[in-house]
Image (cartoon, helix red, strand yellow):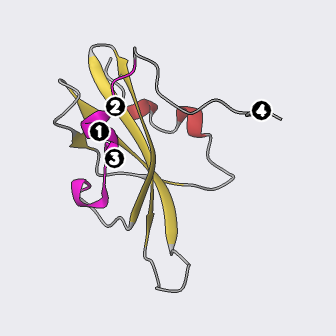
Amino acid sequence: MGKMFLPLSSSKVITRFKNGEPVLSSKDIPYEADCIFNAGVTKYKGKYVTLFRKDYGFDGNNHFNGCVVGVAFSDDGVKEEFMEKTKEMNESIAMHTAFDEYLPE
């Protein structure tokens, strides 16, 4: 039986950030963050908008005290301005509108 899956590779139209290094890490964030996940970037009304999940308060035993979604904006897609306010992830928040107050007009 032959190979079932082709080797994984990126499309030629995708450029990986610094050879696959993370776009964000905990040292980039101006508040407590033990882990950063799923940073997504898009351009909206002339600014780059980054949304990311951050876990904080690691107790050393596979448990975090909290998990929030943070947002940052950038004019050039590199130097980001992080919003002070983050949104706790829970069932009562509508994440698709949680950061509307920060979006450029």
The residue singled out by tag 2 in the image is 16
Which one is in front in this view, the residue at disc 4 or the one at disc 2? 4
The residue singled out by tag 3 in the image is 22
Q: What element carries label 4?
A: loop
Which one is in front in this view, the residue at disc 4 or the one at disc 1? 4
Sort mark 4 into few (<14), some (14-19) or many (20+) by Cα contacts within 10 Å: few
The residue singled out by tag 4 in the image is 2
Q: Residue at x 46, y 19 (%)?
A: 11
Q: Which of 64 and 91 is in front in this view?
A: 64
Q: Is mark 1 on a helix, strand or loop?
A: helix
User: Do the residues under discs 3 and 1 have CB atoms within 8 angstroms?
Assistant: no
| CA separation in Å, label 2 and label 3 | 10 Å
| CA separation in Å, label 3 and label 1 | 9 Å
Q: Residue at x 41, y 62 (%)?
A: 35
Q: Can residue 102 be seen in this view?
A: no
Q: Which amino acid does label 4 sit on?
A: Gly
| CA separation in Å, label 3 and label 4 | 34 Å
